[in-house]
Image: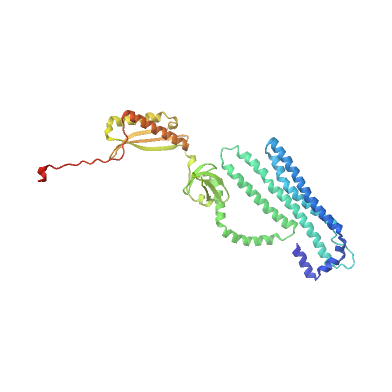
Amino acid sequence: MTDSITAKILCTGISFNDIINFEIVKGNTIWRFAAVLIVIIVAMAAGKIVQFFIDGFANKKEEAAGANAFTIFLKCLTKPISVAIFGMGLMMCKTFLVFEKEGVEGISPAVEGISLTIKNGWTQIASAVIAISVAYAIYRLVDVVEHYLILLTSKTETKLDDMLVPVVRKSLRVTIFIFSVIYIIDNILNQDVKSILLGAGVGGIAIALAAKDTIANFFGSVTIFTDRPFQIDELVRIEGHYGPVEEVGFRSTKVRTTNGHLVTIPNNTIANTVIENVSRRPFIRRTANLTITYDAGHEKAKKAVEIIKEILEDIEELNALPNKPPRVFFSDFNDWSLNIYMSYWMTPPDYWLSHKINERVNLEMMKRFEKAGIEFAFPTQTLYLKKDSEQNLT
């Protein structure tokens, strides 16, 4: 606005001394400028006071009944109301100033034009501040929408909806910001939005080329929300990283590894790689080859199989799947041992529970094998040396 006024002054050949000495400025006595200063101070103070009282009222309501849509609504409006009061104060200041006097001698049409430009500029600035306060209020009120979305998603079993809430919040705020800027520029500041958008479009192509990875990650996030390969807190293995999913954003997904490290993986990488969702396994399977010595013979080998079957049958978690009962067989003759194949499926598929059950099975097998005199085999090699007789030596 200052550049526009200066340009008009330079084009008309009017000096600043002419503007200072003409009758319009002389009409703005000191009390008018003092009134403007007082109104601005009062508007700023009034905004802070209103903000303080609304915040206090909202906090009392929140302490009494907890956070709800009404308290969130009040908190969202506190700062925008303060900005709106300041904007109305600016608008009120215009009534204390003299911008133009028609029919006054010694005032050229060019000076009157500059005076009118200042008046219109003041109005535009005040109107823009009020419009910004309204846009700011709408921007903040997205929190109310988020509150209702959280209530809706909390009623569903899937956690994918929880991932969508922050994405919807960010999308709404970006949309409100863009439309607010365009509205203020076009309807209040009266600037040519088409030329601005055209220039932004040319620059946008360059930005898009430079930010192609960011755009690819955005579409990767869309793929994640569409295909639903995992949810928040599910245990996954992606690109060799193993751990629960903590957050899914526009650009990346955060995985907390079992070592405690936070790994950020670009969504474009996730959309184009193999994802192993460990949490969605219906069971945990254990397969083992147990070896006993050849000295056991067929009786003890048969007894070992029976012992293992009895142990597995007594554990409820290993017999919860009718089509997957525990399997135990005397399967093979190894070079140094008799091999017993054991396989069972455990449900629920709890990682730490599986370790407890495996420990229980192992200790019980050792106990019963010791009692039955069955020894576990380990890799051994026996060498037989034949000594030749003295006759053969001579």
Q: How is the image coloured?
A: rainbow
Residue with the most extreme bottom position? 13
Q: Is residue 90 above or below residue 298?
A: below
Q: Is residue 241 left or right of residue 142?
A: left
Q: Is residue 387 left or right of residue 360?
A: left
Residue 302 in percent (x, y) is at 31, 30
Q: Is residue 333 left or right of residue 197?
A: left
Camera-nearest residue between 344 and 378: 378
Determine if residue 349 is in view.
no
Give the image quarter of residue 371: top left
Look at 79% across and 48% down and name the residue there. Answer: 46
Look at 68% across and 37% down and name the residue there. Answer: 66
Look at 47% across and 37% down and name the residue there. Answer: 352
Total marks in image: 0
Give the image quarter of residue 34: bottom right
Residue 93 in percent (x, y) is at 82, 55
Residue 174 in percent (x, y) is at 65, 51
Camera-nearest residue between 383 and 214: 383
Determine if residue 33 is in view.
yes
Residue 313 in percent (x, y) is at 40, 29
Camera-nearest residue between 127 and 92: 92
Q: Is residue 120 left or right of residue 141?
A: right
Give the quadrant of the N terminus.
bottom right
